[in-house]
Amino acid sequence: MEKLLQETAHRAAAYLKDNRDRPVAPSPEAVHALAALEEALPEEPAEPAAVLALLDDVVSPATVCMTGPRFFGFVIGGALPATVAASWLATAWDQNAALHNVTPGPAILEQVALNWVLELLGFDPNCGGALVTGATVANFTALAAARNQVLAQAGWDVEADGLCGAPVITVLAGEEAHPSMLKSLGMLGLGRNRVVRVAVDGQGRMRADRLPEITGPTIVCTQAGNVNTGAFDPIGDICAAVQPAGAWVHVDAAFGLWVGAVPSLQSLCPGLADADSWATDCHKMLNVPYDCGLALVRDPKPLQRAMAITADYLPTTSTERNPSDFTPELSRRARGVEVWAALRSLGRSGLVQMVEDMCRHASRFATGLTDAGFEILNDVEFNQVLVSFGSSEQTLAVVKAVQQDGTCWCGSTVWQGQTAMRISVCCWATTDQDVELSIAAITRCARAVRSQ
Ligand SMILES: *Cc1c(COP(=O)(O)O)cnc(C)c1O
């Protein structure tokens, strides 16, 4: 085992070093070479070292450098060094992090990490929390607590009696809600299509003045960080408008939650702490490895009512926090390890610096590309930049040319009818120089497309 793991460390380090320098997108040849994996099921065992070599030789060159400093496609982030290392060690532990008294180490790490997150955000330290696979499941988890609570207020126990015959829940969401929010609502039996959509402004922010009157059990799904513009719903105004009538306000803050921890950015999202629940991704801006989402709920009781199970063979103690009392999963990996490692290695100041740097880089992209003569379509206040290079065809041609050039990687989107290149800055490793190299590459590609 020791030799194998040393060999793995060697290969992984070489991969990560290479990630800084090689083209961000893999070569077509490397992608074609993946066909070597489509072999018949082996009849006989193989040496673990040979399995590892096959993996590294065939698959590493075919990966997109998502942990590299110049990957700006999607808001996904890389992985901080301490988190990669912690993840390896935790894999060696192979703990089933469901119950405190069976896996006390991961349970404590998770509790500490949750406490630190709440402290960083200035949230109530008694909030409930669940570390899950990603923001989709974090939305699902928090909305399950919301569903429990708004129906409990109407005298209905949804976990025991289901939705058939239950009082009707009204669900409101902005026109720009992320599709994963609608999926979560669908999985909860609240329906993707029966959601009442609320109008948004030019940056995709829900308009608090367009909220309907609240009657009966109601859940309002807001957003902190639009995937295209990075804009934030006016969460404080929305809470003030609907909470007095008993509505539950949930925030999909998959990548936007961390502004709450950064004094210079808190003004982007006034009232963030007033909501009833929040979902975020630690595998995005916090830069931990996949997969790691986080649901936070102001009152832990409805979350626990929605998620806890008991069985005679499952040992529980009443005083300690069992992670699985708050999560959809029972068996689960020790996700808190990497969140703890990220925060333990960054400290408060490191986290603030990392998020501020992302915003600074985004703003530099906006000025650099404006100066080069291209149009920025959004107000660049956070980490997102939308660029138009003329017609839809021209913009898509530039995106394709940039991906082929390999200096950096950006995707495309359509923002309120206009095709755009989408730049998401969210990796800890991105430096000023990476941004300059990328602006130069994008400009070069755009001029080449224009001259054709
Ligand atoms: C990424 C994202 C999601 C989905 O997160 P997953 O981790 O992919 O499940 C939901 N909402 C927003 C705003 C996002 O950016």
Image: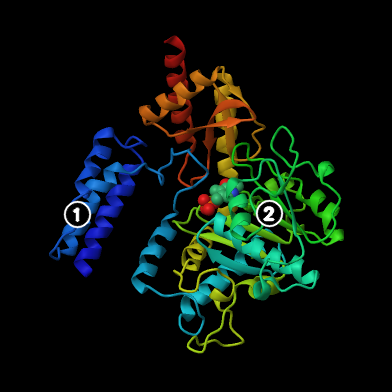
Q: Secondary structure at mark 2?
A: strand
What colour scheme does the image use? Answer: rainbow
- Label 1 Cα crowd, 10 Å radius (few <14 / some 14-19 / many 20+): some
Q: Residue at x 57, y 71 (%)?
A: 112
Q: Upstream in the sequence, badge 2 or badge 1?
A: 1
Give the labeled residue for mark 1.
Answer: 53
Between 405 and 297, the residue placed more toward the observer is: 297
Horizontal side, residue 349 vs residue 84: left or right: right
Between 198 and 162, the residue placed more toward the observer is: 162
Q: Residue at x 64, y 74 (%)?
A: 304
Which amino acid type corresponds to the residue marked 2 in the rendered image?
Val
Horizontal side, residue 112 vs residue 82: left or right: right
Q: Secondary structure at mark 1?
A: helix
Query: Is residue 150 positioned above or below 415 on the image?
Result: below
- Label 2 Cα crowd, 10 Å radius (few <14 / some 14-19 / many 20+): many
Horizontal side, residue 73 vs residue 64: left or right: right
Which amino acid type corresponds to the residue marked 1 in the rendered image?
Ala
Residue 207 position, x and y percent, is: 78, 41
All told, the count of numbered labels is 2
